[in-house]
Amino acid sequence: MILLTGATGTIGRELVHALAARDVEFRIFVRDPRRADGLPERARRVVGDLDDPNTYAPALDGADRLFLLVPGIGLDHTRDMVAAARTAGVGRIVLLSSYNVMGDPIPAMGRWHHERESIVRAAGLPYTILRPGGLMTNALEWAPVIRAGGVVDDPTGPGRYAPVDPGDIAAVAAMALTEDGHDGMEYYLTGDEMFTIADQIAVIAAAIGHDIDVREAATPEQAVASRYPHGAPPALAAAILEGFTLMRRDTTGFRTDTIERLLGRRPRNFTDWCTRNIDAFRTNQTARTP
C-alpha cells in the first residue's frame, strides 16, 4: 500500500494517474476530498491535514511506501511525517525535492529542500530523492496576462534552463515507488530542451497564433510577481529573487538525461505541452501575422 501526500497538486495528480495505470494499491492524503474530484476512484481518499500530525497515523496504517511532497518552506511537516512513517513501519520513502539543492553555497530556494532531504536520510529508511528542475506548468502563471493581451515580465533575460513536464516526474516517482533498484538514489530531472523565458513565450505565441510581448522585469516586485502574481512571503520572495539572479547568470543551463535513462524515452517537450494546454492561453484576439 502506497500513501501519497500532495496528491491534488500539479505533480501529485499526474502521479495518481500513473499509479492507477500500474494497478497498485494506494491512497491519497487529502484535507478536502472535493479537491480530489476527477481523480480515479481507485485512489482511496484518506482525510487528513499536514498541519495536524494526529491525522498521520490513520493515513499511514498498513502503508509500506510513502510519496512525500510538502508545500511551503517549513520543516515540521517533513519531520513529523517521516517520524510517523517510521512508527508505522513504512519501508520506502520517495521524497520530492528540488534541483536547487545544488550549489556551494546552496541558494536559499534549495536550503529547505536540503534540510528535508537530511531529515529523510536520518530516518534510516530506504529512500529515493527526486530533484526536478523548473516545471513546464510554471508557464501557466503567464496565462492571465497572455489572455488579457498584456506584456509578460521576464526576470531572467539570457538565463537558460530545461523545463520538465510534471507527467515525467510522476512517471519516475511511480517507478521508484513500485520497482526495485532505486533505494538511495538521487535523481535530477529535467527536460532535454533549453529555453530562455523569451524562447518559451515564443513557443506559446506560435501555439495560440499571435504575438506576445515580453519585457525585462524592471523592479524586484515585478520579478516576484512574474512567478507569484498574488505575492509571496518575504522569505520566499527573497529566495525567488536570488534564484532569478543565479538563473540570469546561467546562459548555458542545466540538463540531465535521467528521464530518458529511466523511462526509455525522451522527456516530453514544451511544444507538445503547450498544445495540450492551449486553452489556458487562448484569447479572443484575432490572430495576426508577426
Image (cartoon, grey):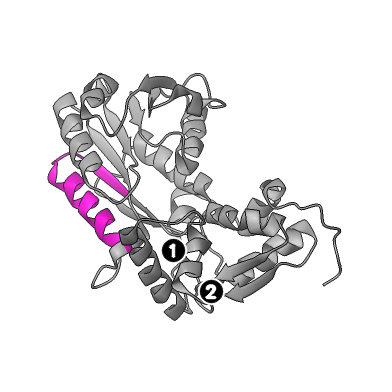
Residue type indicated by callout 1: Thr
Q: Which residues are magenta?
A: 109-129
| SS type, badge 2 | loop
Tag 1 or tag 2, which sits nearer the N-term? Answer: 2
Q: Marks 2 and 1: which is nearer the front?
A: 2
Q: Is residue 140 visible?
A: yes
Question: Dot 1, crowdedness within 10 Å: few (<14), some or many (≥20)?
Answer: some
Question: Dot 2, crowdedness within 10 Å: few (<14), some or many (≥20)?
Answer: some
Residue type indicated by callout 2: Ala
Question: In the shown orientation, is residue 71 left or right of residue 17?
Answer: left
48 or 11: which is nearer to us? 48
- The quarter of the rendered structure image containing the C terminus is bottom right
Quarter of the view holding residue 200: bottom right
- Please determine whether, in this image, residue 44 is positioned above or below residue 151: above
Q: Residue at x 56, y 55 (%)?
A: 141
275 or 183: which is nearer to us? 275
Between marks 2 and 1, how big is the CA–CA gap?
29 Å
Q: Residue at x 43, y 71 (%)?
A: 244
